[in-house]
Amino acid sequence: MSINPLEHLCRVWTRIFSVEAERGEGIYLYDLAGHRYIDFTCGIGVTNTGHCHPKVVKAVQEQAAKLLHGQINIVLHQPALQLIKELIPLVPEGLDTIFFSNSGAEAVEAAVKLSKHATGRTNVIVFTGGFHGRTHLTMAMTTSKIGYRLHYQPLVPGIFVAPYPYLYQLGMEEESATRFCIKELKRLLKTQTAPNETACVVIEPELGEGGYIVPPNRFLLELQDLCREHGILLVADEVQSGYGRTGKFFACEHSGIVPDILVMAKGMASGIPLSGIATRKELTTRWRTGSHGGTYGGNAVACAAGVATIQAILEEHLLENTTQRGVELVTGLKQLQGQYPCIGEVRGLGLMIGVEFSKPDREPDPITAKAVVKEGPAPTTT
Protein backbone atom coordinates (compact mmCIF):
# COMPACT_ATOMS: atom_id res chain seq x y z
CA MET A 1 0.00 0.00 0.00
CA SER A 2 1.46 3.32 -1.13
CA ILE A 3 0.73 6.23 1.16
CA ASN A 4 1.17 9.86 0.15
CA PRO A 5 1.71 11.67 3.48
CA LEU A 6 0.50 15.00 2.07
CA GLU A 7 -2.93 13.49 1.45
CA HIS A 8 -3.14 12.61 5.14
CA LEU A 9 -1.76 15.85 6.58
CA CYS A 10 -4.53 17.76 8.33
CA ARG A 11 -5.57 20.74 6.23
CA VAL A 12 -6.32 22.94 9.23
CA TRP A 13 -2.71 24.13 8.96
CA THR A 14 -2.36 27.10 6.62
CA ARG A 15 0.42 26.53 4.10
CA ILE A 16 1.62 29.28 1.77
CA PHE A 17 4.62 27.54 0.25
CA SER A 18 5.35 23.96 -0.83
CA VAL A 19 9.04 23.85 0.11
CA GLU A 20 9.97 20.51 1.69
CA ALA A 21 12.90 21.31 3.94
CA GLU A 22 15.59 18.69 4.47
CA ARG A 23 17.81 20.69 6.76
CA GLY A 24 18.49 24.16 8.10
CA GLU A 25 21.66 26.06 8.83
CA GLY A 26 21.82 29.62 10.13
CA ILE A 27 19.42 31.79 8.17
CA TYR A 28 19.03 29.16 5.43
CA LEU A 29 16.70 26.26 4.69
CA TYR A 30 17.64 23.57 2.14
CA ASP A 31 15.10 21.49 0.24
CA LEU A 32 15.51 17.89 -0.98
CA ALA A 33 17.05 19.06 -4.25
CA GLY A 34 19.69 21.14 -2.46
CA HIS A 35 18.11 24.52 -3.23
CA ARG A 36 18.83 27.13 -0.58
CA TYR A 37 16.29 29.61 0.78
CA ILE A 38 16.72 32.55 3.14
CA ASP A 39 14.21 31.86 5.92
CA PHE A 40 12.75 35.26 6.75
CA THR A 41 10.05 33.56 8.85
CA CYS A 42 12.48 31.96 11.34
CA GLY A 43 9.82 29.37 12.05
CA ILE A 44 7.46 32.28 12.84
CA GLY A 45 9.89 33.97 15.19
CA VAL A 46 11.33 30.80 16.75
CA THR A 47 14.87 30.24 15.47
CA ASN A 48 16.34 33.45 16.84
CA THR A 49 19.82 31.88 16.96
CA GLY A 50 19.44 30.49 13.45
CA HIS A 51 18.64 26.96 12.35
CA CYS A 52 20.59 24.24 14.14
CA HIS A 53 22.94 26.52 16.03
CA PRO A 54 25.95 24.30 16.93
CA LYS A 55 25.81 25.25 20.62
CA VAL A 56 22.12 24.40 20.84
CA VAL A 57 22.50 21.15 18.88
CA LYS A 58 25.35 20.05 21.15
CA ALA A 59 23.31 20.81 24.28
CA VAL A 60 20.32 18.84 22.94
CA GLN A 61 22.49 15.85 21.98
CA GLU A 62 24.26 15.73 25.32
CA GLN A 63 21.08 16.10 27.36
CA ALA A 64 19.22 13.50 25.29
CA ALA A 65 21.82 10.94 26.33
CA LYS A 66 21.33 11.78 30.02
CA LEU A 67 17.64 12.44 30.65
CA LEU A 68 14.91 13.05 28.07
CA HIS A 69 12.15 13.87 30.51
CA GLY A 70 11.87 14.38 34.23
CA GLN A 71 8.39 15.54 35.21
CA ILE A 72 8.89 18.67 37.27
CA ASN A 73 6.27 17.68 39.86
CA ILE A 74 8.27 14.52 40.52
CA VAL A 75 11.96 15.35 40.05
CA LEU A 76 14.18 18.40 39.63
CA HIS A 77 16.84 18.42 36.94
CA GLN A 78 19.83 20.61 36.21
CA PRO A 79 18.68 22.03 32.83
CA ALA A 80 15.57 23.63 34.38
CA LEU A 81 17.49 24.95 37.38
CA GLN A 82 20.27 26.30 35.17
CA LEU A 83 17.78 27.95 32.83
CA ILE A 84 16.25 29.79 35.78
CA LYS A 85 19.73 31.02 36.73
CA GLU A 86 20.25 32.28 33.17
CA LEU A 87 16.82 33.92 32.92
CA ILE A 88 16.55 35.85 36.18
CA PRO A 89 19.27 38.43 35.29
CA LEU A 90 17.61 39.01 31.90
CA VAL A 91 13.96 39.56 32.79
CA PRO A 92 12.86 42.98 34.09
CA GLU A 93 14.01 43.71 37.62
CA GLY A 94 11.65 42.44 40.29
CA LEU A 95 10.45 39.42 38.31
CA ASP A 96 12.02 36.66 40.36
CA THR A 97 9.88 33.57 39.79
CA ILE A 98 9.63 31.36 36.69
CA PHE A 99 6.98 28.90 35.52
CA PHE A 100 7.66 26.72 32.46
CA SER A 101 5.22 25.44 29.87
CA ASN A 102 5.31 24.32 26.23
CA SER A 103 3.70 26.88 23.92
CA GLY A 104 2.89 30.56 23.80
CA ALA A 105 -0.83 29.94 24.23
CA GLU A 106 -0.18 27.81 27.31
CA ALA A 107 2.01 30.52 28.81
CA VAL A 108 -0.67 33.17 28.17
CA GLU A 109 -3.22 30.90 29.84
CA ALA A 110 -0.88 30.56 32.82
CA ALA A 111 -0.56 34.35 33.04
CA VAL A 112 -4.33 34.84 33.00
CA LYS A 113 -4.96 32.07 35.54
CA LEU A 114 -2.31 33.51 37.85
CA SER A 115 -3.83 36.99 37.45
CA LYS A 116 -7.28 35.72 38.43
CA HIS A 117 -6.00 33.93 41.52
CA ALA A 118 -3.69 36.75 42.59
CA THR A 119 -6.34 39.48 42.29
CA GLY A 120 -9.53 37.57 42.98
CA ARG A 121 -10.95 39.23 39.87
CA THR A 122 -12.46 37.69 36.74
CA ASN A 123 -12.04 39.91 33.67
CA VAL A 124 -9.26 40.47 31.13
CA ILE A 125 -8.54 43.43 28.85
CA VAL A 126 -6.71 42.92 25.55
CA PHE A 127 -6.09 45.15 22.54
CA THR A 128 -7.25 45.27 18.93
CA GLY A 129 -4.97 43.35 16.60
CA GLY A 130 -3.51 41.21 19.35
CA PHE A 131 -2.62 37.55 18.90
CA HIS A 132 -2.38 35.47 22.07
CA GLY A 133 -3.02 31.91 20.89
CA ARG A 134 -5.63 29.47 19.61
CA THR A 135 -6.84 27.64 22.69
CA HIS A 136 -10.40 28.40 23.70
CA LEU A 137 -9.35 31.13 26.15
CA THR A 138 -6.59 32.66 24.02
CA MET A 139 -8.86 32.62 20.94
CA ALA A 140 -11.19 34.87 22.87
CA MET A 141 -8.24 37.18 23.53
CA THR A 142 -7.07 37.18 19.90
CA THR A 143 -8.40 39.88 17.57
CA SER A 144 -5.78 39.96 14.81
CA LYS A 145 -8.20 38.39 12.31
CA ILE A 146 -11.61 36.78 12.34
CA GLY A 147 -10.41 33.43 10.97
CA TYR A 148 -9.12 32.34 14.35
CA ARG A 149 -12.55 32.78 15.96
CA LEU A 150 -14.92 31.93 13.11
CA HIS A 151 -17.44 29.18 14.01
CA TYR A 152 -15.88 28.66 17.45
CA GLN A 153 -18.31 30.96 19.24
CA PRO A 154 -19.28 31.27 22.01
CA LEU A 155 -15.82 31.84 23.42
CA VAL A 156 -14.63 32.34 26.98
CA PRO A 157 -16.46 35.35 28.47
CA GLY A 158 -14.99 38.23 30.43
CA ILE A 159 -12.65 39.42 27.65
CA PHE A 160 -12.79 43.12 26.74
CA VAL A 161 -10.98 44.85 23.88
CA ALA A 162 -9.36 48.30 23.92
CA PRO A 163 -7.81 50.14 20.93
CA TYR A 164 -4.11 49.63 20.26
CA PRO A 165 -2.22 52.80 19.26
CA TYR A 166 -1.90 51.91 15.57
CA LEU A 167 -0.66 55.32 14.46
CA TYR A 168 -0.74 54.68 10.71
CA GLN A 169 -4.34 53.48 10.59
CA LEU A 170 -5.54 56.00 13.17
CA GLY A 171 -3.92 58.79 11.20
CA MET A 172 -2.48 60.24 14.40
CA GLU A 173 0.88 61.27 15.81
CA GLU A 174 2.24 59.61 18.94
CA GLU A 175 0.86 62.13 21.40
CA SER A 176 -2.68 62.20 20.03
CA ALA A 177 -2.78 58.40 19.60
CA THR A 178 -1.62 57.91 23.18
CA ARG A 179 -4.21 60.34 24.48
CA PHE A 180 -7.00 58.71 22.45
CA CYS A 181 -6.16 55.11 23.39
CA ILE A 182 -5.71 55.81 27.10
CA LYS A 183 -9.00 57.75 27.10
CA GLU A 184 -10.77 54.81 25.45
CA LEU A 185 -9.24 52.39 27.94
CA LYS A 186 -10.50 54.51 30.81
CA ARG A 187 -13.91 54.58 29.15
CA LEU A 188 -13.84 50.78 28.97
CA LEU A 189 -13.13 50.61 32.71
CA LYS A 190 -16.16 52.82 33.34
CA THR A 191 -18.61 51.23 30.93
CA GLN A 192 -17.80 47.51 30.48
CA THR A 193 -15.42 46.05 33.07
CA ALA A 194 -14.94 47.86 36.38
CA PRO A 195 -11.40 48.03 37.77
CA ASN A 196 -12.36 45.91 40.78
CA GLU A 197 -13.42 43.06 38.47
CA THR A 198 -10.49 43.36 36.03
CA ALA A 199 -7.69 40.94 36.81
CA CYS A 200 -5.20 41.94 34.12
CA VAL A 201 -4.42 43.86 30.97
CA VAL A 202 -2.55 41.79 28.38
CA ILE A 203 -0.56 43.61 25.72
CA GLU A 204 2.11 42.88 23.13
CA PRO A 205 4.84 45.57 23.54
CA GLU A 206 5.19 45.33 19.77
CA LEU A 207 2.12 43.95 18.06
CA GLY A 208 3.10 40.79 16.18
CA GLU A 209 0.57 39.20 13.86
CA GLY A 210 -1.54 42.34 14.10
CA GLY A 211 0.99 44.14 11.91
CA TYR A 212 4.34 44.65 13.68
CA ILE A 213 3.07 47.85 15.23
CA VAL A 214 5.22 49.74 17.72
CA PRO A 215 3.21 51.68 20.32
CA PRO A 216 4.54 54.97 21.69
CA ASN A 217 6.66 54.52 24.80
CA ARG A 218 4.48 57.07 26.55
CA PHE A 219 1.41 54.92 25.91
CA LEU A 220 3.01 51.89 27.57
CA LEU A 221 4.16 53.97 30.54
CA GLU A 222 0.71 55.51 31.01
CA LEU A 223 -0.84 52.06 30.68
CA GLN A 224 1.47 50.82 33.43
CA ASP A 225 0.50 53.75 35.67
CA LEU A 226 -3.21 53.12 35.07
CA CYS A 227 -2.87 49.43 35.95
CA ARG A 228 -0.99 50.24 39.15
CA GLU A 229 -3.55 52.84 40.12
CA HIS A 230 -6.33 50.25 40.00
CA GLY A 231 -4.45 47.15 41.16
CA ILE A 232 -4.78 45.55 37.72
CA LEU A 233 -1.90 43.29 36.73
CA LEU A 234 -0.01 44.26 33.58
CA VAL A 235 0.90 41.25 31.43
CA ALA A 236 3.45 41.70 28.62
CA ASP A 237 2.96 39.05 25.95
CA GLU A 238 6.49 38.72 24.54
CA VAL A 239 5.92 35.37 22.87
CA GLN A 240 7.05 36.83 19.55
CA SER A 241 8.86 40.02 20.55
CA GLY A 242 11.08 38.40 23.18
CA TYR A 243 14.52 36.81 23.01
CA GLY A 244 16.20 39.54 21.03
CA ARG A 245 13.76 39.91 18.17
CA THR A 246 13.58 43.71 18.67
CA GLY A 247 17.24 44.29 19.52
CA LYS A 248 16.61 44.09 23.28
CA PHE A 249 16.22 40.81 25.07
CA PHE A 250 12.61 41.78 25.73
CA ALA A 251 10.70 44.50 23.87
CA CYS A 252 9.39 46.07 27.08
CA GLU A 253 12.96 47.26 27.72
CA HIS A 254 12.56 49.86 24.96
CA SER A 255 9.93 51.74 26.98
CA GLY A 256 11.18 50.84 30.44
CA ILE A 257 7.92 49.32 31.65
CA VAL A 258 8.11 46.49 34.19
CA PRO A 259 5.14 44.15 33.74
CA ASP A 260 3.74 42.13 36.61
CA ILE A 261 3.89 39.05 34.41
CA LEU A 262 6.13 38.53 31.37
CA VAL A 263 5.11 35.85 28.86
CA MET A 264 7.79 34.22 26.71
CA ALA A 265 7.94 31.34 24.22
CA LYS A 266 8.94 30.98 20.53
CA GLY A 267 12.66 31.90 20.69
CA MET A 268 13.28 30.36 24.12
CA ALA A 269 14.87 27.11 22.92
CA SER A 270 15.74 27.73 19.25
CA GLY A 271 13.06 25.37 17.94
CA ILE A 272 12.46 22.97 20.83
CA PRO A 273 9.00 23.57 22.38
CA LEU A 274 9.38 25.67 25.53
CA SER A 275 7.55 28.62 27.03
CA GLY A 276 7.21 30.30 30.36
CA ILE A 277 6.20 33.24 32.47
CA ALA A 278 8.30 35.41 34.76
CA THR A 279 6.56 37.10 37.65
CA ARG A 280 6.94 38.18 41.27
CA LYS A 281 7.10 35.56 44.01
CA GLU A 282 4.62 37.63 45.99
CA LEU A 283 1.98 37.01 43.28
CA THR A 284 2.62 33.27 43.07
CA THR A 285 2.02 32.86 46.80
CA ARG A 286 -1.64 33.55 45.93
CA TRP A 287 -1.64 30.89 43.16
CA ARG A 288 -3.03 27.80 44.83
CA THR A 289 -0.54 24.93 44.65
CA GLY A 290 -1.71 22.27 42.20
CA SER A 291 -4.24 24.53 40.45
CA HIS A 292 -2.07 24.78 37.33
CA GLY A 293 0.66 22.71 35.70
CA GLY A 294 1.52 20.55 32.71
CA THR A 295 3.22 17.24 32.02
CA TYR A 296 5.92 18.49 29.67
CA GLY A 297 6.52 21.99 31.07
CA GLY A 298 10.21 22.42 31.80
CA ASN A 299 11.23 19.36 29.78
CA ALA A 300 14.90 18.50 30.34
CA VAL A 301 15.97 18.59 26.68
CA ALA A 302 14.00 21.79 26.02
CA CYS A 303 15.56 23.50 29.04
CA ALA A 304 19.04 22.43 27.96
CA ALA A 305 18.35 24.01 24.58
CA GLY A 306 17.04 27.08 26.43
CA VAL A 307 20.30 27.48 28.36
CA ALA A 308 22.36 27.14 25.19
CA THR A 309 20.10 29.64 23.40
CA ILE A 310 20.66 32.36 26.00
CA GLN A 311 24.40 31.71 26.04
CA ALA A 312 24.60 31.91 22.24
CA ILE A 313 22.63 35.17 22.12
CA LEU A 314 24.88 36.81 24.72
CA GLU A 315 28.25 35.35 23.73
CA GLU A 316 27.79 36.09 20.03
CA HIS A 317 26.36 39.59 20.59
CA LEU A 318 23.21 38.74 18.66
CA LEU A 319 21.28 41.64 20.20
CA GLU A 320 23.73 44.12 18.73
CA ASN A 321 23.64 42.26 15.43
CA THR A 322 19.86 42.41 15.41
CA THR A 323 19.94 46.18 15.81
CA GLN A 324 22.53 46.63 13.07
CA ARG A 325 20.81 44.30 10.59
CA GLY A 326 17.49 45.95 11.42
CA VAL A 327 18.85 49.37 10.45
CA GLU A 328 20.06 47.90 7.16
CA LEU A 329 16.71 46.26 6.48
CA VAL A 330 14.66 49.36 7.28
CA THR A 331 16.96 51.53 5.18
CA GLY A 332 16.54 49.24 2.18
CA LEU A 333 12.79 48.93 2.62
CA LYS A 334 12.37 52.70 2.87
CA GLN A 335 14.31 53.10 -0.37
CA LEU A 336 11.80 50.72 -1.97
CA GLN A 337 9.00 52.74 -0.39
CA GLY A 338 10.25 55.77 -2.28
CA GLN A 339 9.87 53.83 -5.54
CA TYR A 340 6.59 52.07 -4.81
CA PRO A 341 3.74 54.17 -3.36
CA CYS A 342 1.84 50.99 -2.46
CA ILE A 343 4.26 50.62 0.48
CA GLY A 344 2.38 52.76 2.97
CA GLU A 345 4.66 52.28 5.95
CA VAL A 346 7.83 50.53 7.07
CA ARG A 347 7.95 50.04 10.85
CA GLY A 348 9.28 47.95 13.69
CA LEU A 349 12.11 47.46 16.16
CA GLY A 350 15.30 45.50 15.58
CA LEU A 351 14.46 42.73 13.12
CA MET A 352 10.78 42.65 13.99
CA ILE A 353 10.00 44.71 10.91
CA GLY A 354 6.74 45.05 9.03
CA VAL A 355 5.81 46.53 5.67
CA GLU A 356 2.23 47.71 5.18
CA PHE A 357 0.85 47.73 1.66
CA SER A 358 -1.98 50.20 1.37
CA LYS A 359 -4.08 52.25 -1.00
CA PRO A 360 -3.73 56.05 -1.24
CA ASP A 361 -6.40 56.50 1.46
CA ARG A 362 -4.37 54.21 3.82
CA GLU A 363 -6.88 51.42 3.48
CA PRO A 364 -5.17 47.99 3.41
CA ASP A 365 -4.17 46.61 0.00
CA PRO A 366 -4.39 42.83 0.45
CA ILE A 367 -4.13 42.14 -3.29
CA THR A 368 -0.65 43.64 -3.52
CA ALA A 369 0.42 42.07 -0.23
CA LYS A 370 -0.64 38.59 -1.37
CA ALA A 371 1.02 39.09 -4.75
CA VAL A 372 4.32 39.97 -3.06
CA VAL A 373 4.11 36.89 -0.85
CA LYS A 374 3.23 34.68 -3.81
CA GLU A 375 6.43 35.73 -5.61
CA GLY A 376 8.56 34.02 -2.96
CA PRO A 377 10.44 32.07 -1.95
CA ALA A 378 13.17 32.28 -4.57
CA PRO A 379 15.74 29.47 -4.23
CA THR A 380 19.41 29.52 -5.18
CA THR A 381 21.49 26.46 -5.98
CA THR A 382 24.56 26.00 -3.80
Image: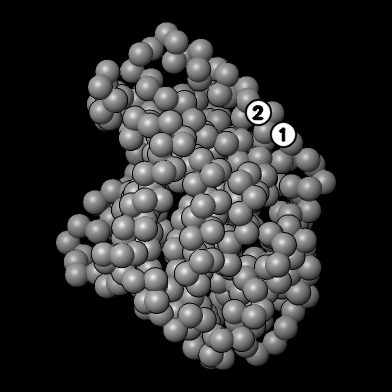
Label 2 environment density (alpha carbons within 10 Å; few <14, some 14–19, many ≥20): some
Looking at the picture, tell me which residue is in the foreground, 53 or 228.
228
Quick check: marks 2 and 1 in contact, CB under 8 Å?
Answer: yes
Looking at the picture, tell me which residue is in the foreground, 75 or 280.
280
> Is 19 placed left or right of 48 in the picture?
left
Q: Which mark is residue 321?
A: 1
**Residue 229 seen in the figure:** yes
Q: Which residue is mark 2?
A: 325
**At 36% from the left edge and 56% from the top edge, which residue is drawn?**
185
Q: Which mark is residue 46?
A: none
**At 65% from the left edge and 74% from the top edge, which residue is drawn?**
280
Check disc 2 and report its element: helix, strand or loop: helix
**At 33% from the left edge and 35% from the top edge, which residue is drawn?**
170
The amino acid beneath tag 1 is: Asn
Looking at the picture, tell me which residue is in the foreground, 357 or 74.
357
Instruction: Using the image, determine if residue 300 lies above or below residue 372.
Output: below
**At 44% from the left edge and 79% from the top edge, which residue is drawn?**
116
**Residue 40 seen in the figure:** no
The amino acid beneath tag 2 is: Arg
